[in-house]
Amino acid sequence: MAIKPVLRMGDPRLLEPSKPIKKFRTAELRNLITDMRDTMASLKGAGLAAPQIGVNLQVVIFGIESNPRYPDAESVPFTILVNPKLTPVDKEIEEGWEGCLSVPGMRGLVPRFLNLRYQGFDENGKKIDRTVDDFHARVVQHECDHLAGILYPMRIRDMRNFGYTAELFPDEDIADD
C-alpha cells in the first residue's frame, strides 16, 4: 500500500492507549498491516506498532532476520499480533540496549522481562500463544508498550544510559535510526 510517516516522541498521539480490534479479515485491517509492513521494511525496523503511524489500534508487527540496526540480535519470526496480552514467565529482568523508529538516532538501556508468554491473534483472528525469551521477548515488550502509550525512554532506570547512538557507540557500526 504505502510507506507512512512515523510519529516521533513528543507527538501526543504516541501517549494514548490503543483500542482493541473488534473485527478481523477486514480491508481496513489488511491495509493497515500492509502499510505497517512497508513502513517497517523501508526503515529497516525490527518492529512497528500501529500508533507509530497514527492509527490508535492494538496491532503490532515484528520480525528480524538480519538487521543493521541490531547486528548481534538473533532472528525473530515475522509476526502480526493483534490485541496482545503479555505475561512474564518469571521475574527475571535483563537490561538491554533499545532504539525506536519514533526516537530516531538514540538508544537507551531498558529493563525487560527475559522470559515472556504472549497471546493474541493474527490478522485473520487465529489465536497466537507463544513463550519466548531474550531478544524476541524484548521486541514484543517494546512494541506492545506502544499500545499502552509507553515509549522506551520512560522505562530507562538511569538516564546516563540514554543518548545518541553515535555518541554511545562511537567505535561500532550500528545503523542510525
Image (cartoon, rainbow, N blue to C red):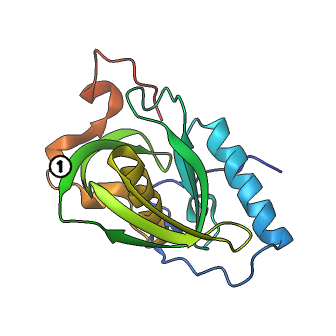
54 shown above or below 57: above
SS class, disc 1: helix
User: Residue placed at 39% from the left, 65% from the top?
Assistant: 117
User: Residue placed at 58% from the left, 35% from the top?
Assistant: 44
Lateral position of residue 101 relative to residue 167, left or right: right
Lateral position of residue 135 relative to residue 76, left or right: left
102 shown above or below 30: above
At label 1, counting other C-alpha atoms closer than 10 Å, the crowd grade (few under 14, some 14-19, many 20 or more) is: few
Q: Nearer the viewer, residue 161 or 133?
A: 133
Q: Quadrant of residue 82?
A: bottom right
Name the amino acid, label 1. Answer: Met
x and y, in percent, of residue 122 in the image: 66, 66
x and y, in percent, of residue 31 in the image: 80, 61
User: Residue placed at 66% from the left, 50% from the top?
Assistant: 5
x and y, in percent, of residue 153 in the image: 30, 55
What residue is shown with label 1? 159
